Image (tube, rainbow, N blue to C red):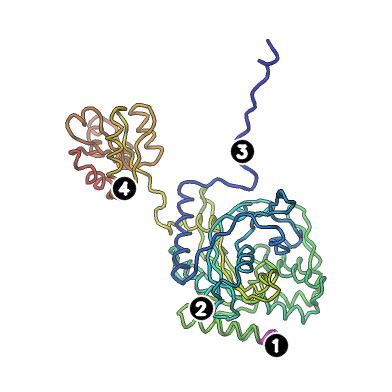
Amino acid sequence: MSKAKKQKSFRPKARKAKGFEDRHGKLLRSENALIKAASDIFDAHGFEPLSTPAFEYADALGKFLPDEERPNAGVFAIEDDDKQWLALRYDHTAPLARFVAQNYDGLAKPFRRFSAGPVWRNEKPGPGRFREFIQVDADTVGTKSPAADAEMIMLAAKVMQGVGLTSDEFTIYINDRRLLDVLLADLGVADTTEGLLQKGIVVRAIDKLDRLGERGVELLLGSGRKDDSGDYTKGAGLTTAAIAKVLAFTRSGHQDRNNTLSAIEKLLGNSELAKQSLNDLNMINDLVTAAGWDENCVFFEPSIVRGLGYYTGPVFEANINLQATDAKGRPMNFGSVGGGGRYDGLVARFKGIEVPATGFSFGVSRFAALMSSLDRLGDQDIAPVVVLALEPDQMASYFTMAEELRADNIRAEVYMGTSGMKAQMKYADKRGAPAVVIVGEDERMAGNITVKNLNLGSKISEQITDNVQWRKANAAQSTDKRSMLVNLVQKTLTP
């Protein structure tokens, strides 16, 4: 045997890249429904759609990366032909800042926009944590008014309602990052480089309260913490007394918004920054109260700090207060599905002047999967009626029938394979088709059509034990004149 015959042709292994996922069918339809619901709400409030490139120059992203402990990491980057580094966007906010700076003079300000699309993060993947996911954002750029923050909070609440949640099934939690700045300044954390790093560790530690509990956060505020895998995270190095004050701040929330604001005021004193923050929160409170959002739905929560370093004022987070089960029947808590806040420094990196901004975003894939599991996005996976192709030379008539059904808003397809009736029925069953349209030679010669209800037929077949019951199974199908195609299919699909 020759050497050439011994060599095998290369066959690549079919595999997904680590940290990425394939999405199709019902989940993808649910994602599209969620994006549309949110986009319709933003559009109704006067926000304009904006799409930016997947790649940005890496210096446009700057130090504002998801993981500040790894400067210039956390993104997927390539070097282009002119030796400049390009990075896939990790959110929609940094590209927005670049767009506003680049088009500043021509934009009506405040500039209001919404975006939807994929973002990429070069981080360690884990359960439910992917390197690519869809985000939807809405932002207002060019105003310091707390009214803009209040509007974002109410938009977040409206998105929750827009996907079918009632006011007792979600909560928008609100805080202000400046309040933490006041507390840390009182504890001796200075605005030096070292102090800012320490502050960043404190913020990220508090942001993990839900996941790690008070004890885990206490360790991160102190010397550090070793996780279950043995990885060690360096702590903020606060004293025992300082840790107690930080945790007391996170516990200062009360059952209503006014009492929470009073408790925070007593805890933090009367510094100018504290007064400014509390004045803004009081205005937000007045606006959401006037709009009718009750205490359970929109709530002040001092433990909400948001982990990203660019927030400079009010921050907020959308939580779903429900539990569902996954595909394997295991319970899963919903928790946070989105959030945002005020960031007044991003555009200044380009312009050299402060351009205030506030925004809200949510990750689509997880949110859609959770809502789909509760059937809150409607039936997003209605399978098509299948027109069987029993006579190859009659494909034109099968196509015509499918078009008639589509014209009446009935999802339909013609079988495109070359197999016989048994295989075609098996295909329709595997597709989850609710019904099939059957026109073979006998039906065609008689000018008839037969529509078989696959859902009803499946139920009947489970009960068949003899020939008498088999003959009764014909109730699962109906025959009528060809002109009655649409009516017969509609009748079959009506519960």
Q: CA distance from mark 4 to mark 3?
A: 36 Å
Q: Which residue is mark 1?
A: 272
Q: Secondary structure at mark 2?
A: loop
Label 3 crowd (10 A; few <14 / some 14-19 / many >=20)? few
Evaluate whether residue 333 shows in this view. no
Please name whichever residue, 291 or 35, is drawn nearer the observer in this view of the structure. Answer: 35
The image quadrant where one finds the N terminus is top right
Q: Reading the chain from its start, which is encountered first: label 4 or label 1?
A: 1
Q: Is residue 252 magenta?
A: no
Of callouts 3 and 2, the N-terminal one: 3
**Secondary element type, mark 1:** helix
* Element assignment for label 4: loop
Q: Nearer the viewer, mark 3 or mark 2?
A: 3
Give the percent coordinates (x, y) of residue 475.
23, 39
Nearest the viewer among 51 and 279 is 51
> Disc 4 marks which amino acid?
Ile
Q: Which residue carries the number 3 mark?
A: 15
Residue carrying label 4 = 410
- In primary-sequence order, the first of circles 3 and 1 is 3
Q: What's the magenta region? A: 264-275
Residue 272 horizontal/vertical position (percent): 70, 88
